Amino acid sequence: MSEFNYSVDSDGIGIISWDVPNKSMNVMSLDGLIQLDELFDKAISDNNVKGIIITSGKTDFAGGMDLNVLADMKSAQGVNPAQGLFDGVMRIHKLLRKIELAGMDFKTKKGAKPVAAAITGTAAGIGLELPLACHRIFAVDNKKAKIGLPEILVGIFPGAGGATRLVRKLGAMNAAPFLLEGKLLSPSKMKSAGIIDELTESENLIADAKSWILQAKDSDCVKPWDEKGYKMPGGAPYHPAGFMTFAGASVMVNAKTQGAFPAAKALLSAVYEGAQVPFDTALKIEARWFTNILMNPSSGAMMRSLFINKEALEKGAVRPKNIPDQQVKKVGVLGAGMMGAGISYVSAMAGIEVILLDMKKEDAEKGKAHAENLLNIGIKRKKITEEKKLTVLNLIKPTIEFTDLGECDLIVEAVFEDPAIKAEVTKKAEAVIGKDCIFATNTSTLPITSLASASVRPEQFIGIHFFSPVDKMLLVEIIKGNATGDKAVAKALDYVQQIKKTPIVVNDARFFFANRCIIPYVNEGAMMVAEGIAPASIENAAKQLGFPLGPLQLTDETSIDLGVKIIKATQAAMGNEYPKKNGDEVSFKLFDEGRLGRKTNAGFYEYDDKGKRTGLWTGLSKIWPTKETQPDFEEIKNRLILSQVLEAIKALEEGVLEDIREGDVGAILGWGFAPWSGGPFGWTDIKGLKNVVEICNKLSLKEGKRFLPPKLLTEMANNNENFYGKYLKKDDAA
């Protein structure tokens, strides 16, 4: 099956059109690479062809590389996978270099056939690396299109010449945001950055590219780095200015990653070393560092969780079979506070009509005003138009009347975390909604089965737990009660897909999955403070593990009074089973001091008048003096990460989690669990189950039974198993 089509027009222009069958977006496969190579050879060898246009037969240009290509390269060499990867990557380099030179006599720099890339829409990963090898890049001026090199976000870096070409084109300083941050920008912004050469309208794309080809001179077909006397913009590493740039980049990478993300360091090494040698040698260096990172377990784990597994969940991997489409047409949101307002906003942004209900009309209006404020920010940042703003706001109807919910096919309740209040609004809503309407609660802690007792249709009652802030957080946790039916699950999943977020489905249990893992993390941080462990050591240990927020900062962000409420509710529910060793005294003391976190500009941290953190509160050491003898730093790190990992394993053991992919993706997107590890199950596999059991046993002797390894972990370790080997079905594996 052909993934590239080839034709020659009446003007002698060879057009290679990328159009992968049965896919909405082009991705580069091994067959695709072979076909592109053959077609380019055909165009170059044809004397009647004056130049070549590489374009797409789809709305978008390309979404990147099919990750199975990398897996195939890795397995091709059997006992020497690194060699297989390196050889495979070099074949890609050879192809793109062939396109770049296009038959040119390298000595005279003459004779090349002009090659233009005509980008139809989004172009990511190799979808940009391929155009970067062409002589001129034309792109449709589409504000919705995204162009860039996002590989760093999934644990690798642009290894098909993207790193080398972009640095030589822009200089290290200007290339850094695209390489180290994976920035994806609109075509117009990419032109301003110097990456896209020409903007055009869709109907003129091919004509404009053809016009350039027919007028192109030999010099237009020579890349700057192939010209005699080429100097890197901003200076090479041995140049004074370049040295400062690379030294600064090294400091920035280490500051941002704390050594936890190997891809960033490998990328910097490839760029630094490659900048000091001729271009073709630089490509070899890039290939070696790319191979190095692909052989690192971290990159495989990140790609698996942040690309393969995430995409599978978004496409309905865990959706009940044989349930027809359940897309939401009209959603009723009960409660117009921050959560309800946020849910209304993301729903309306997806084109869903929203009935936003609160007890007071002014409160309901405030909820809509929150959406308006977010839209105004979007306009200011040029991400949203005035027309879009009006469309979204017209979809949100504030009300105090339950009868307005009558035509809703989904209700999302987001009132106070009080079972009595939730029961009251459930009954009022069910009195007016249709018999097929699904009722969802946004509770973060209260058991779904218990809340469903207020419903006359518990099979249509489900939990849809959003994370705050709703407009920014990507994860949505869907919780099944004991009586929840498949239709409700399908409805929730289809809704989450509509609002462009990533769902995980879990079974009912106290704190569900996400909070079950987060709470021990923040508790462990508080316990350490009470023990006299230096607060800075606690926070830095978390950062070195790859967490975006340490447990103390996270507590400040989520608010200390919320933590106190959860503690008291948990104490009441668990009674004598409530753990004796905990960090409650720290939370209670801060609460009594009025230090509630960011919302009061006072918590574990101190803040200035503008709400910016200025450092850890000096009063912590006065209330809980820092011990003279501090524990080993590795021990602090182990306590922080295992407090979460063990809960994730217990959730799987108890059947709260049904799919380890949901556990890993949910942990990374929900609270930023060490992305480099691929999630708690990925981390355990990388660390080695026997090693983890050993660490747990040592910690439990010192810290108590909360660190005892779960039975499942011990059994798997004894059987020399790992989680992805045991639980990932063959059909699910990439």
Image (tube, rainbow, N blue to C red):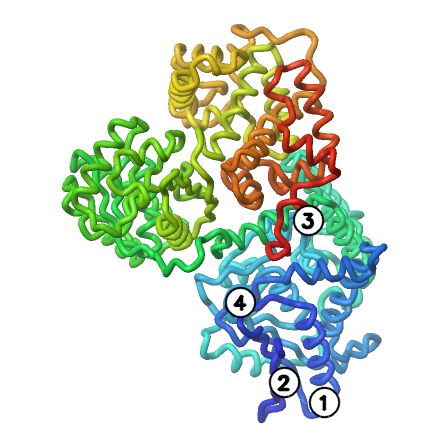
Position of residue 358 in the picture relative to residue 513 (left or right): left
State how far apart marks 2 and 3 are (Cα): 38 Å
Q: Which residue is mark 3?
A: 300
Q: Residue at x 18, y 38 (%)?
A: 428
State how far apart marks 1 and 2 are (Cα): 9 Å
Q: Nearer the viewer, mark 4 or mark 3?
A: 3
Q: Nearer the viewer, mark 3 or mark 1?
A: 3
Q: Amino acid at mark 2?
A: Gly
Q: Amino acid at mark 1?
A: Asp
Indicate which disc residue 25 carries.
Answer: 4
Q: Nearer the viewer, mark 4 or mark 1?
A: 4
Whichever of labels 3 and 1 marks the residue nearer the N terminus, that label is 1
Q: Which residue is mark 1?
A: 46
Q: Which residue is mark 2?
A: 14
Q: Amino acid at mark 4?
A: Met
Whichever of labels 4 and 3 marks the residue nearer the N terminus, that label is 4
Q: Amino acid at mark 3?
A: Gly
Q: Answer yes or no: do the residues labelled 1 and 2 have beta carbons within 8 Å?
A: yes
State how far apart marks 4 and 2 are (Cα): 23 Å
State how far apart marks 3 and 1 are (Cα): 42 Å
Is 122 located above or below residue 677 in the figure?
Answer: below
Q: Residue 388 falls in which quadrant of the image?
A: bottom left
